[in-house]
Image (spheres, coloured by chain):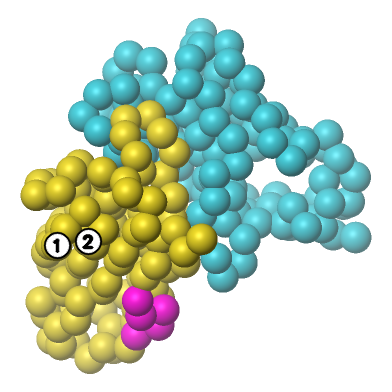
Chain colours: A cyan, B yellow
Amino acid sequence: GNSVTQMEGPVTLSEEAFLTINCTYTATGYPSLFWYVQYPGEGLQLLLKATKADDKGSNKGFEATYRKETTSFHLEKGSVQVSDSAVYFCALSPKYAGNKLTFGGGTRVLVKP
Amino acid sequence: NAGVTQTPKFQVLKTGQSMTLQCAQDMNHNSMYWYRQDPGMGLRLIYYSASEGTTDKGEVPNGYNVSRLNKREFSLRLESAAPSQTSVYFCASSEKTNTEAFFGQGTRLTVV
């Protein structure tokens, strides 16, 4: 079956530090890949996505590249802010059987001033 | 822009009580989903509806039922609540395969 594995948190950083959250997946074929962000007390919001190998998704200074050879979709940001404190979820959607997202366990990120 | 609207936002139930979580979307999406979120376990799919008139089980359907009332609305029912169903429930919708899902604000349910 499909699965997503992401690094456990919490990840605690200082402002302006570099952030990387690892995500690897197992799926049949070539799924679409997503990063969602959940701010405290809110629902999930799409942060970025990539639909095919070597695609790079980017948004709000975050980037992730779809690596077919390593089945990975690591999230990076060069300089984090306190407002980036949130829980980040990696997810995949297979290209068949509807858009059933499979989520990783989430990584809590805390950015300190 | 309302997007996906869930009601209620908070609920406390006693073991054995029943309740229905409501979800409505105004984006004319075909597919709708119910997830539960538990600490350290990410989001797990309870039920989904690929299109109006169809529903299917997800990863953790036991203890739940759903109804796709029309294209806009997708409800989740707990017939006899158990403490193990204490969780945060999210409804989501999407247009079609490979498009992103849009989430509601969640319902925090506590079963005592």
Where is residue A1 shown, x and y percent of the image? 25, 29
The answer to whether mark 2 and mark 1 are in CB contact below 8 A is yes
Q: Does residue B46 show up?
A: no
Where is residue A68 shown, x and y percent of the image? 49, 12
Instruction: Name the amino acid type tagged 1.
Output: Leu
Lower position in the chain sequence, tag 2 or tag 1:
1
* Crowd rating for badge 2 (residues with CA inside 10 Å; few <14, some 14–19, many 20+): many
Left or right: residue A17 versus residue A1 is: right
Q: Does residue B27 show up?
A: yes
Q: Which residue is mark 1?
A: B69
Left or right: residue A97 versus residue A90 is: left
Residue B86 numbered mark, or none: none
Span shown in magenta: B7-11
| Residue B15 position by quadrant | bottom left
Where is residue B95 shown, x and y percent of the image? 34, 39
Task: Assign a secondary structure to mark 2.
Answer: strand
Task: Assign a secondary structure to mark 1.
Answer: loop
Q: Is residue B2 positioned above or below B17 on the image?
A: above
Chain under numbered label 2: B
Q: Which residue is mark 2?
A: B74
